[in-house]
Amino acid sequence: MQKKMNKEEIIITALNQVLQEVSDLKERLYLSKKVFNVKDFSFYSGFKESHIYKLTSQGEIEFSKPNGKMVFFDKEIIDKYLLQNSVKARTSIESAAIEYAYRKK
């Protein structure tokens, strides 16, 4: 037998659904932005803000400082940075080796 929900439980359930939808919209907004600040970069990448500042101070990632204070990043540059040093899957390496072996004959 299914328990009936009282008003409070219905409201809490509805609020949780709204919060989830807001969270989903926020995530989609980040994906559509072209320029990120440090906070956006942190949310998008999962890096701590202190790590991002360290990347900028060590010259590991390109950034802009249009007013000499705030730091901004191009999303494409962030994506390139996050996807650098990729590790190929074993099947890709095996396919490349087979292809190379056939070309050498």
Image (cartoon, rainbow, N blue to C red):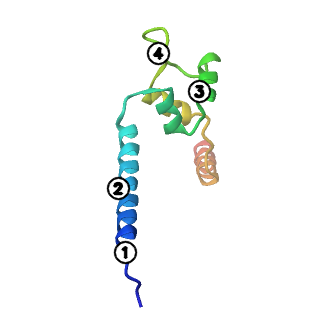
Dot 4 or dot 3, earlier in sequence: 3
Circle 3 or circle 2, nearest the eye: 2
Dot 2 or dot 4, earlier in sequence: 2
Circle 3 or circle 1, nearest the eye: 1
Three-letter amino acid code at the position of disc 1? Asn
Quadrant where the C terminus is found in the figure:
top right
Instruction: Count neighbours of disc 4 (C-alpha within 10 A) and say few if under 14, some if 14 to 19, many if 20 or more.
Output: some
Circle 2 or circle 4, nearest the eye: 2
The residue carrying mark 2 is: 18
Quadrant where the N terminus is found in the figure:
bottom left
Residue located 35% across and 56% down the image? 18
Instruction: Report the side of 10 relative to 86 (left or right).
Output: left
Three-letter amino acid code at the position of disc 4? Ser
Dot 3 or dot 1, earlier in sequence: 1
Could you give the CA–CA distance between mark 3 and mark 2, rounded to whole angstroms? 31 Å
Instruction: Count neighbours of disc 2 (C-alpha within 10 A) and say few if under 14, some if 14 to 19, many if 20 or more.
Output: few
The residue carrying mark 4 is: 64
The residue carrying mark 3 is: 52
- Which of the two residues, 44 or 4, is positioned nearer the viewer here? 4
Secondary structure under badge 2? helix
Question: Are discs 2 and 1 less than 8 Å apart at CB?
Answer: no
In the depicted structure, whether residue 80 falls above or below residue 90: above
